Amino acid sequence: MEFNPKIVAFLCNWCSYTGADLAGTSRMEYKANVRAIRVMCSGRIEPTFVLRAFTQGADGVLICGCHPGDCHYQEGNYRCLRRYLLLQKYIEQMGIETQRLKLEWISASEGKQFAELVNSFTETIRDLGPCKIKEIVNVLT
Amino acid sequence: MEQTKPKLKLAVYWAAACGGCCVSVLDVHEKLFDVIAAADLVFWPIALDIKYKDVEEMPDNYIDITLFNGAVRNSENEHMARLLRKKSKILLAYGSCSHLGGIPGLANFSTKEDIFRRVFEECESVVNNNNSKPLPEYEVPEGILELPVFYNDVRSLAQVVDVDYYLPGCPPQTDRFLEVFTAIVTGAELPPKGAVIGASVKAQCDECVRKKSEDKRIKKFYRPWEINDDGETCFMEQGVLCMGPATRAGCGYRCIKGNAPCRGCYGPSSDTTDPGAKMMSAIASIIDEKEPEDIKRVIDDVVDPAGTFYRFSLPTSLIRRKMS
């Protein structure tokens, strides 16, 4: 059976979710592998959310927020960026491919960019293959 | 201590542990007389000559309280965990290793093969010309010799058997143990099963005595020996990594009072799922940089995030082990 990646996308309410919405209302087609989760701000995305997504079977996690300087709450996206860079360093130490976690800035008008991002990220994860975290965590339980 | 119940039967066992937890029980000093007035010690390998087979012969639920310290690293540890669970009314995970995996849990950064290769082949002080490795069974003329099976993963006690209570710490503060012990002996109402006892529900920072400001901004992280600590200001504000934000209070701040940052042995506070994730959140909030390159430069100072944030809790963290 062909590997169909499961991807969890955390999208901020003000820019990225609206951008994803624009892709939809503009009838753009993109890969259906992404499960979108709307959060009020990319600064709300705790590292726990990302790690838990992986342990529950996500093959990739996508984080999208407003472009730097555009955050609805002034600097939530900078917090997100710093958490993301720390997470990247951590998951690399844990032997998890860093490409499985991606941060991109998507504005409310970037529906096309969102569709392209989802397609390219899905391909990246498809090439990487299934993520082993869930399996290993289950064996240990 | 006034006693309302018949004399208790107390057992203390060490699995993958350093012995510090057993010593912390001995640290009750002269209160030991109160302890043994209230309880008979029926099994305690560090102090008493009672064999495993004696424990096996005890009826089920014979022991009132077992203080189980140490992680589960091999088949012997697992056997004793299951045995003591069966023989004990209350099984208490005593100390960081049985609570969270502890320092032995850091071995989950390696595999069994890595460890055996390092210890029996590569280690500078080892001469092992026939490349021998420990085998679980070995036949000699007199019969078969057995060794415990070394597992690939270190697990906490609760990942192997049902645990009633957790008493955290590396080692637990003896005063906290005495409080818990006194509560059991005097028949005080016990907390709900699964509770972390002998510790606070809050984080270290909530109770820490060091001076904190609301505006923490860090442009560089330091190792403790790189700064001239003023003895008063929050370690994080001075740029020294301190596990306080992600750690349960209740230890009495012995490290902080000794001018050393918290290492996180009491485990995550009650509202924290994963101590490392919490620390990443906390650190991300105080780094005073906005450009990716500058942020990366600051993060470079955090040399070993996984080992630092999960020093005592790797096996019970969300990711649990290094993927191989």
Image (cartoon, rainbow, N blue to C red):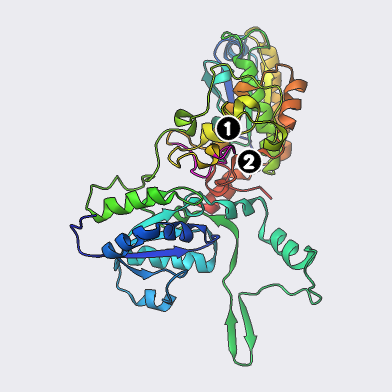
Query: For mark 2, does the 10 Å Cα neighbourhood hold few (<14), some (14 to 19), or many (20 or more) residues?
Result: some
Find out whether the residues at labels 1 and 2 contact each other: C-beta distance under 8 Å: yes
Prevalent SS, magenta region:
loop
Q: Which residue is denoted by mark 2 in the rendering?
A: B308
Mark 1 to mark 2: distance in Å? 10 Å
Determine which quarter of the picture holds residue A97: top right
Question: Residue A23's x, y, as percent?
Answer: 63, 13
Indicate yes or no whether the magenta region holds residue B18.
no
Question: Residue B211's x, y, as percent?
Answer: 53, 24
Residue found at x 65% / y 17%: A78
Residue B159, above or below A79:
below
Whether residue B51 sits left or right of residue A121 in the image: it is left
Query: For mark 1, does the 10 Å Cα neighbourhood hold few (<14), some (14 to 19), or many (20 or more) residues?
Result: many
Circle 2 marks a residue in which chain? Answer: B
The local secondary structure at tag 2 comes to helix
Residue at far left of view: B4
What is the three-letter code of the residue carrying label 1? Met
Question: Residue B194's x, y, as percent?
Answer: 36, 47
Magenta segment, which residues?
A: B258-269
What is the three-letter code of the residue carrying label 2? Thr
Circle 1 marks a residue in which chain? Answer: B
Residue B286, above or below A135:
above
Q: Nearer the viewer, residue B99 or B162?
A: B99
Q: Earlier in the sequence, mark 1 or mark 2?
A: 1
Q: Which mark is residue B148?
A: none
Residue found at x 76% / y 26%: B297
Q: Which residue is denoted by mark 1 in the rendering?
A: B279
